[in-house]
Amino acid sequence: MIRWEISAFDWAQFQHLETRIGNVRVLSDFENVEIDGLDGFILEFDEDTDPKAISNALVNQFCCIGTHVAVIENGISGLIKYVSKMAESEDAELLLAELFAGGKNVDKWF
């Protein structure tokens, strides 16, 4: 089962992080990254952890604000169904369905 957790997101903080961790390729690259609270956070991972997984965990830790506003247990279809029940969500629901079904509007680098 796939579990999605949706939170409020601090875009400015993400842009700040992205400039610092965007070029991390190996674990030792994090030694040159200056982010408050990073040292203790990195110690939670063992040396075999993929740096991409650490970067994703950093984004989750430092950019997701407060508690999760939704937890979706049924993958993409559950997410679309959840959004469809929200007030004034028709456009978002259709966009999500298009993105996941056909790949429209996805950046080339993704």
Image (spheres, rainbow, N blue to C red):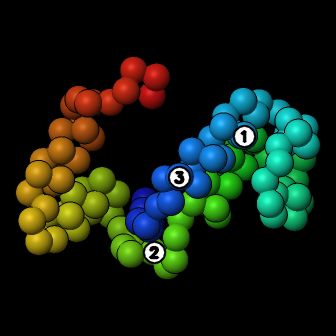
Q: Locate residue 3 relative to residue 24 in the image: left or right.
A: left
For disc 1, the marked residue is 20
- Frontmost of labels 2 and 1 is 1
- On-image quarter of the N terminus: bottom left
Is 21 rendered above or below residue 40? above
Disc 3: CA contacts within 10 A as few (<14), some (14-19) or many (>=20): few
Q: Alpha carbon of mark 2 to alpha carbon of mark 1: how far?
A: 25 Å
Q: Locate residue 62 relative to residue 37 in the image: left or right.
A: left
Instruction: Give the mark nearer the N terminus: 2 vs 3.
Output: 3
Q: Alpha carbon of mark 2 to alpha carbon of mark 3: how far?
A: 19 Å
Q: Residue at x 57, y 44 (%)?
A: 15
Image x and y of residue 104, in percent: 23, 29
Residue 39 falls in image quadrant: bottom right
For disc 2, the marked residue is 68
Amino acid type of the residue that numbered disc 1 sits on in the rendered structure = Arg
Is 23 rendered above or below residue 18? above
Is 32 rendered above or below residue 39? above
Image x and y of residue 53, in percent: 68, 47
- Frontmost of labels 3 and 1 is 3
Where disc 2 sits, the SS reads strand
One can see residue 32 in this view? yes
For disc 3, the marked residue is 12
Q: Are marks 3 and 1 in contact (CB under 8 Å)?
A: no
